[in-house]
Image: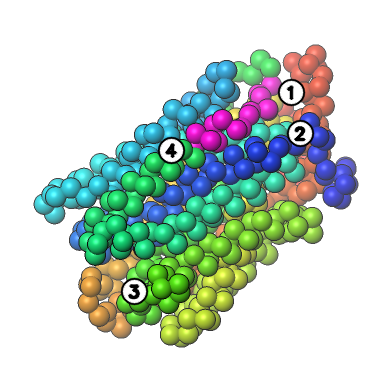
Amino acid sequence: MPSSSTSAATPPKSHRLSLTEYVGYALGDTASNLFFQTFNVFLTYYYVDVWGLAAAAVAQMMLLVRFTDAVSDPVMGMIADRTQTRWGKFRPYILWMAVPYGVTGYLIFASPELSQSGKLLYAYVTYTLMLLAYTGVNVPYSSLLGVLSPSSETRTVASSFRFVGAFGGGLLISLLVRPLVKGLGGGNEVLGFQHTMAIFAVLSVLLFMITFVTTRERVTPPEGQKTSVKEELLELARNRPWVILLVGTVFSTSFIGLRAGSTLFYFKYVVGDDGTPVLFGQLDRVTVFLASGSACMMLGSACLGLFARMADKRTLAVLLTSTTALCFALFFWLPPDNFALLLLLNGLGCFAMGPTSALVWAMYADVADYGEWKFGRRSTGLVYSASLFALKTGTMLAGFLLPLFLDRFGFVRNVAQTPQARLGIQLAFSLVPGVLAGLKAVSLWVYPLHRGEVLRIERELLERRERPAARAEVLPVAAPAEV
C-alpha cells in the first residue's frame, strides 16, 4: 500500500490544473450560490414576511416541490453520463442551461399582482421551474469536478477553490441583498427583491459562461463501457462509501438550510434588530452577521490545503463538523443582546464548516473512482446527481421545518412575538441545526475510504488506463476488508 505522506500524494504535472481553470471552475459555484444561498437565507422570509403567504402553505409547498425536484437529479445524471459532444459530457449543459437558470431564478421574485391563491400557485410554478433549471445546470457542474483530473489531490484543490467561490457567492448575498433591497425598492421590499434578483440573474449567467470556457474534461469512462440504468443504480446502491456520504449530505444541507433560513427571523424577532446600520453607515446587524459568517467560510475553505496535509480527509471532516455542531447548538444559551459573542461563535462555526463542504464534495469524486475500480464502470454523473438528490432532500427538510416551526409555535408576521413563538425561532436557529450537524459528523466517522486506500485505487485505475489491451479483460474486483 502506498504511503499517505504528502510527497506520495503529490500528483504529476499532467494531472494538475492551471490557476485559470481552478478559478473558472470556482466561479460556477459562485453563480449557483447567487440563487441557492438567497433561497436558503431569504426565500421563506420573502414568501411569509414580505409577500404574505401563510407559513403552513409555504411548508407544504417546500415539501412537495423539493421532493419532486430531488427525483429529477438522478435522471439528469444518467442523461449527462450518456452525452457525447466535442465539449465533453458535462460542460455542454453549463452552456445550454445557464440562461434558463437565470430567467427562472428572477421569475420567483417577479412579484406580479395576484390574489392570495394566485400568489401560491405562482410560487409553486416558478419555484418548480427554477429547481428544474438548477438541476439542469448544477448536476453537470458538480459532476465536472470528478473529471477535471484523475488525481484525487488535484480534485481536492479544485473542490477547495470551488467552495471559496461558493462562499464568495454567499458573501455577496449576505453583504448586498438587504442594502440593495432597501435602496432599489425605496422602502418597498417586494420591488427591492425584484430588482435585486434581476441583477443576480444576469451575473449568474455570465459566471457560468466563464466556467464553460475555462474548464476541460480529462477523465473518461473505460473503453467499451456498456450503459444499463438498472445495473448502474444497483452498483450505486452497493457503493457503501457513496451511501454513507449520501446520509451525511442529507444531514448537512438540513442543518445549513434550517439555520440560514431562520437567521432573519432570529434577528428581527429574538435579537430585536430594527435594521439600524451598525457598520459603514449601511450594514445592519443581520447583514454583518451573515457576511462575517460567509467570510469565515471562505477563509476556512482557503485553508483546506493546509488542513489536508495535517490529517486524512475523513478524520478532518469529522473534527470540523463536530466543531460546527457544538458552536451552533450553543447559540440556544447565548444572550441575544451580546452581538460580539454571537459574531465570535458564529465565525468559529462557519470557519470549521467551510473546508468540510469542500472535503465532502472531493470525497464524492473518490467515490466515483471507487465505483469504477470495484465494478468496472464509471458513472460520474450518476454519483454526483444522486448526491445532489441528497442535497435537495436535506434542503427540502429544512424548507419544510422552518415554516413548520413558525406555524406550530404561533408566529405572526410583523408583530412582537410571544415567548412560545420566540422559542420556536430559537430552536430552529440553534439546537436543531446543532443536532443535525452532529449526526453528519457521526455519518462521516464511519466513511471507509481513508487516504491510503484512495491513493491505491487511484494508482490501480491509472495502470488500467495505461494498458488498453488489459482494460478489456478487467473484471469487477472484491472490495478490501476495510472497505
Badge 3 element:
loop
Badge 2 element:
helix
Q: Which residue is mark 1?
A: 475
Tell me which numbered mark, 1 or 4, is placed earlier along the sequence. 4
Tell me which numbered mark, 3 or 2, is placed earlier along the sequence. 2
Tell me which numbered mark, 3 or 4, is placed earlier along the sequence. 4
Judge whether residue 145 is colored magenta.
no
Q: Nearer the viewer, residue 32 or 235?
A: 32
Q: Which residue is mark 4?
A: 205
Residue plotted at (25% across, 41% down): 125
Q: Is residue 415 left or right of residue 355?
A: left
Q: Which residue is mark 3?
A: 275
Asked if the residue at tag 3 contacts the one at tag 1, i.e. Cβ–Cβ closer than 8 Å, the answer is no
Residue plotted at (54% across, 55% down): 167
Tell me which numbered mark, 1 or 3, is placed earlier along the sequence. 3
What amino acid is labelled 2 in the image? His
